[in-house]
Image (cartoon, rainbow, N blue to C red):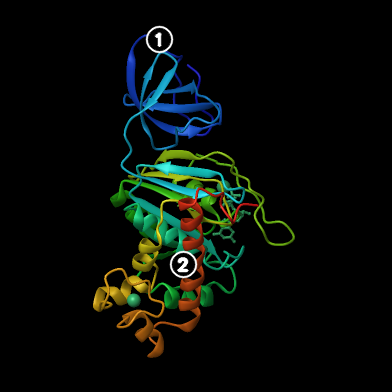
Amino acid sequence: MARNKATGRRQQKPQHNTGQPGLIISHYGVAVLVRFDNGDEQPVKVKRNSDHVVGDRVMVIGERVTSLARRNALRRRDPFGKVRTLAANLDLLGIVVAVRPQTPDGFIERVVVAARAADIEPVLIVNKQDLPGSADFDSQLQRDFPAMVRLSVSAKQGDGLEHLRHKLAGAGRSALVGVSGSGKSSLLNALCPGIELETGALNEEEHGCHTTSVSTLLALPTGGELVDTPGFRDFSPVDVSSEDLAHWFPGVMSVLEEQSCRFRNCRHRQEPGCCIKQAVDQGTFSEERYQLYLNTLQELEQLETARNEGRKNPFCR
Ligand SMILES: Nc1nc2c(ncn2[C@@H]2O[C@H](COP(=O)(O)OP(=O)(O)OP(=O)(O)O)[C@@H](O)[C@H]2O)c(=O)[nH]1
Ligand SMILES: [Mg+2]
Ligand SMILES: [Zn+2]
């Protein structure tokens, strides 16, 4: 019986006439790889723009795949305005960052808000601890995201992987996202010995080379499931409203846990009795991060207005 190259699992021949429940563990554009509940795997053809995604529970009847209802899905808008679903039915989202390559400003915040709005726990995974400058980078992240779970690791040297394994085992289903070259596939290789996903060196500008092109879900030997995704630099959220942002933005959420603004729908601009504005004035919420919040809010509101007026995404190139 043939074996899947990435996972080493058995692949079975397509079965006809009988409906079988399974899970999509890879998506190749015109086909998905389904893992059935008995552990067998089978590639099944799908339409190129079908909405099936890694993490979907499906029913396969003959060569037809039907997705069952999703608990949640993480979606982003790519730079061309197209909505991309990264994965479905997630419990935890590991945002992989490293001192090199740099993660663009605002990236982490947007992913965190999108995850929280979808009821997925966001966790910062600070990879490449073996590189010089990592300690300062880590401290900066601690200052900017004090309330977030932060795991410092090195896929290369194995530091911190025990903590990560433990977190992933307790979570259920997780996915890794982050810019190309941050080390997502390297982490999966370190957590799943023998997997050997392709990894790629950074280029001369210290950017990743978009090595991973297909999302893959793997069952970890130490418990939990983990999805590797292709890297991207921009995260324009899809299912996030300005209200979500005003609530879930990192730092804002921590202040709101202690105090509340006078108005329930406060957007923390100039509204009277705003505890975020007060925190900025008192220096407990940094001016820089507040500015990042306001910029993101403005962008989301423009998107909302455009959507309400039926216009195209104004940020679409
Ligand atoms: N020094 C060091 N290098 C690492 C570490 N983890 C990964 N790398 C290197 O970083 C580069 C990118 O790693 P990948 O695992 O391919 O990164 P990725 O996030 O999967 O990238 P895409 O698939 O393009 O999104 C490779 O050269 C890895 O060897 C680490 O902990 N320390
Ligand atoms: Mg990769
Ligand atoms: Zn407010």
Q: Residue at x 42, y 75 (%)?
A: 142
Q: Where residue 13 appears, x then y in whole percent?
A: 46, 14
Residue 126 appears in view: no
Dot 2 amino acid type:
Leu
Q: Residue at x 33, y 55 (%)?
A: 167
Residue 16 badge: 1
Query: Where ligand 1 lies, by image quadrant?
Result: bottom right
Q: Which secondary structure lies at badge 2?
A: helix
Q: Which residue is identified by label 2?
A: 297
Q: Nearer the viewer, mark 1 or mark 2?
A: 2
Neighbourhood count class around disc 2 (C-alpha, 10 Å): few under 14, some 14–19, many 20 upward: many
Q: Residue at x 40, y 58 (%)?
A: 241
How many numbered marks are there?
Answer: 2
Q: Residue at x 36, y 9 (%)?
A: 17
Give the side of residue 5 with respect to residue 65, left or right.
right
- Furthest residue toward top: 17
